[in-house]
Image (cartoon, rainbow, N blue to C red):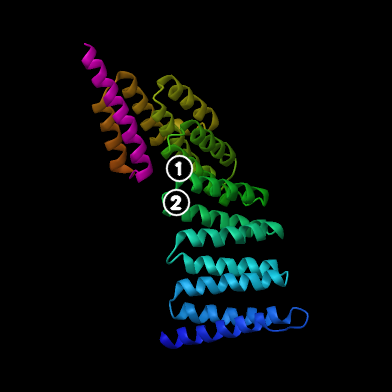
Amino acid sequence: MADHEARGDDFEKKAEKKLTGWGLFGSKYEDAADLFDKAGNSFKLAKNWERAGAVYIKLANCHLKLESKHEAASAYVDAANCYKKISPKDAAQALNQAVNLFLEIGRLNMAARYCKELGELYQQEQDLEKAIDFYERAADLFQSEEVTTSANQCKQKVAEFSAQLEQYPKAIEIFEAIARQSINNSLLKYSVKGILLNAGICQLCKGDVVAITNALERYQELDPTFSGTREYKLLADLAASMDEGDVVKFTDFIKEYDSMTRLDPWKTTLLLRSKNALKAKEEEEDDLT
């Protein structure tokens, strides 16, 4: 480890010396870039992520001086990968620089990929609003490149986080749009019942039984097979128990479904919100009688 660190140190010093020296036709930046690259690799081997990240930023700057934007963007990505180990904030900054450069040179697919990575980074940091921003950007870029599956994955994240932030109409709109887009696609049509279940759970969170009933009718028109699924039955049963104000039935229907098809944490969280709202309403009515 110490050997790698010392080697990295040496390469970095030589690179800095090249930059302060005299060079012909940008050759000093080429020479410095080569040395910064070697320094970065050495610091990575030494697991000194902070110095590796900093050196890759310097490498990016050399490439920018040489007007090699693609190489500069790649160096920012290398910096971000190092910073991810120690500082999500610095990683996000470096990735953002990479995205901007990839956009400048028209590499939209690469820009989309790293916007998605930024979304994941902010998701890990529990900053859902920023995660939504980057997943939305990634979805738009993937869509413009006709990478539909990746675009839909990003849109689903946007919908899920919007629902977590109680932005239910936005989440419903996105889920329904994905379902409409997927129904005529032979590869994606099997995912439609799960997407409609997500949309329906968001409808339940709004607490409007009429809206839920209307939504279920719309979902049957969209996918005639939906009414025969366990997902449809769950939503219809939950809507009925909500209409009756019956918390026990509501809970039992969820338990029954979960015993056969495990509910993921996102669905569990939202269904618990619906249950608590129903319970609060029931208690309020009890107090009035």
Residue type highlighted by circle 1: Phe
Q: CA distance from mark 2 to mark 1?
A: 9 Å
10 Å crowding of disc 2: few (<14), some (14-19), many (20+): some
Residue 58 screen position, x and y as percent: 59, 72
10 Å crowding of disc 1: few (<14), some (14-19), many (20+): many
Q: Is residue 139 left or right of residue 229?
A: right
* In the rendered image, the vertical position of residue 95 relative to residue 215, given as above or below: below
User: Is 203 in the magenta?
Assistant: no
Which residue lies under the disc numbered 1? 161
Quadrant of the image containing the N terminus: bottom left
The magenta region covers: 262-289
Residue 216 screen position, x and y as percent: 46, 27
Residue 267 screen position, x and y as percent: 37, 40
Which residue lies under the disc numbered 2? 123
> Which residue is painted at 33% across and 40% down in the image?
268
Quadrant of the image containing the C terminus: top left
> Which residue is painted at 46% across and 72% down in the image?
49
